[in-house]
Amino acid sequence: MQKRFLGDSGLEVSVIALGTWAMGGAVETWGQVDDRESIAAIHQALDLGINLVDTAPIYGLGHSEEIVGKAIQGRRSEVLVATKCGLLFPKSNDELPPRCLSRESVVRECEDSLRRLRTDVIDVYQCHWPDPETHIRETMDALTTLLEQGKIRAIGLSNFSCEQMTAAREFGPVHCLQSPLSMLQLRAAEDLIPYCIEHRIGVLTYGPLAKGLLTGKFGKDSRFEGIRSQDPEFVGERYRRNLGMVDRLGKIAADYDKTVTQLVINWTASFRGVTAPIVGAKRPSQVVENAGGVGWTITEEDRARIDAIIRS
Ligand SMILES: NC(=O)c1ccc[n+]([C@@H]2O[C@H](COP(=O)([O-])OP(=O)(O)OC[C@H]3O[C@@H](n4cnc5c(N)ncnc54)[C@H](OP(=O)(O)O)[C@@H]3O)[C@@H](O)[C@H]2O)c1
């Protein structure tokens, strides 16, 4: 598996990362998840040379981190663990996770994550979402202290704008950005990715498969629950347009003897400025297919055909 440097952090990450949000096991979000399958999926990823695993405390209120912690026992040297801070656990199901990036909260969250992950260092520690109530100087002070103490190895920002990254960089190093990017969600290409290229910041992109919509497994009669039912890409005319797009992409994928999922992953992993897309999975078979999305090249001509399909 090919690797790339994550900004100037010194860390070398595989060109695709494994996302573990669904492994948090919140049934109302991602449906049924089996912990043994989740652990097997993480082992499968490591076996295939995927060395970056992304999680967060909020994914299943600690459960995703605990699963990652179990899976990496005995294999810690093969893996770079990326987790996050800044979204606290809501008190009820109706409440959104409160945002908090105060010094005290970041330090406490880091200790909680280290315990759940059963490790003494977090490789990539990312602010999950900006916190408008806390000055970024305080947050960056806390993160740089954790870096100096050796509790984290790289600082990341997730869902930050260019202006917010500039503000953060005044007070400490920013090694990577995590931002959405898929064939259906190209906003990051407008300003965030060019900004990261200019400032040598690594780019981890999330949602490359658009919650599975770009895998070709859904059809016009599919019905959705949980996280997908709240996503406009899965509704009405937009959904029908997306299915048409997947169909046309599938024809290009077939020319390479690849699945549409693999074509989509390849396109994302080779997007200029992207260090690695974070591909979510629940089971080993998905990881095997997804790993087959890299290690080959889409021709310039086909890239242009894909761009035309995306724009149509
Ligand atoms: N920083 C942030 O705010 C943020 C936000 C979102 C995500 N993330 C990170 O990015 C990761 C990826 O994003 P995501 O999970 O939202 O979306 P995604 O990677 O676009 O989609 C993942 C889902 O697609 C389905 N899938 C995966 N491989 C498949 C395959 N080969 N065949 C068929 N279906 C397959 C699985 O769902 P089913 O098995 O249920 O069909 C899987 O859970 C997350 O796990 C998380 O680590 C970060």
Image (tube, grey):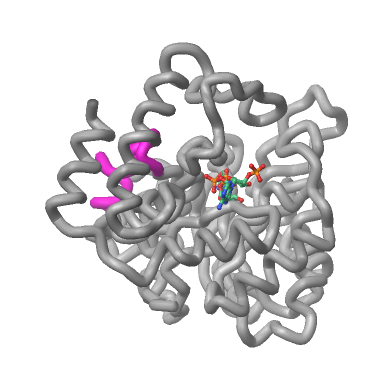
Left or right: residue 6 versus residue 102 is left
Left or right: residue 76 versus residue 199 is right
Give the tally of numbered discs. 0
| Quadrant location of the C terminus in the rendered image | top left
User: Does residue 183 show up magenta in the picture?
Assistant: yes
| Quadrant location of the N terminus in the rendered image | bottom left
Quadrant position of residue 226 = top right
* Closer to the camera in the image, 219 or 90: 219
Give how far across and how far down residue 282 sits, in percent. 69, 53
Quadrant position of residue 3 = bottom left
Compared to residue 65, the image places residue 1 above or below, namely below
**Residue 254 visible in the picture:** yes
Give how far across and how far down residue 33 sits, in percent. 79, 48
Give how far across and how far down residue 21 sits, in percent. 67, 49
Compared to residue 279, the image places residue 146 above or below, namely below
Residue closest to the far top? 236
Compared to residue 237, the image places residue 218 above or below, namely below
Residue at the spot 73% in from the left edge and 47% down from the top edge: 59
User: Does residue 178 show up magenta in the picture?
Assistant: no
Residue at the spot 50% in from the left edge and 66% down from the top edge: 291
* Closer to the camera in the image, 101 or 280: 280
* Closer to the camera in the image, 3 or 44: 44
Compared to residue 174, the image places residue 234 above or below, namely above
Give how far across and how far down residue 70 sits, in percent. 82, 71
Magenta residues span: 182-195
Residue at the spot 59% in from the left edge and 62% down from the top edge: 287
Residue at the spot 46% in from the left edge and 47% down from the top edge: 208
* Closer to the camera in the image, 244 or 37: 244
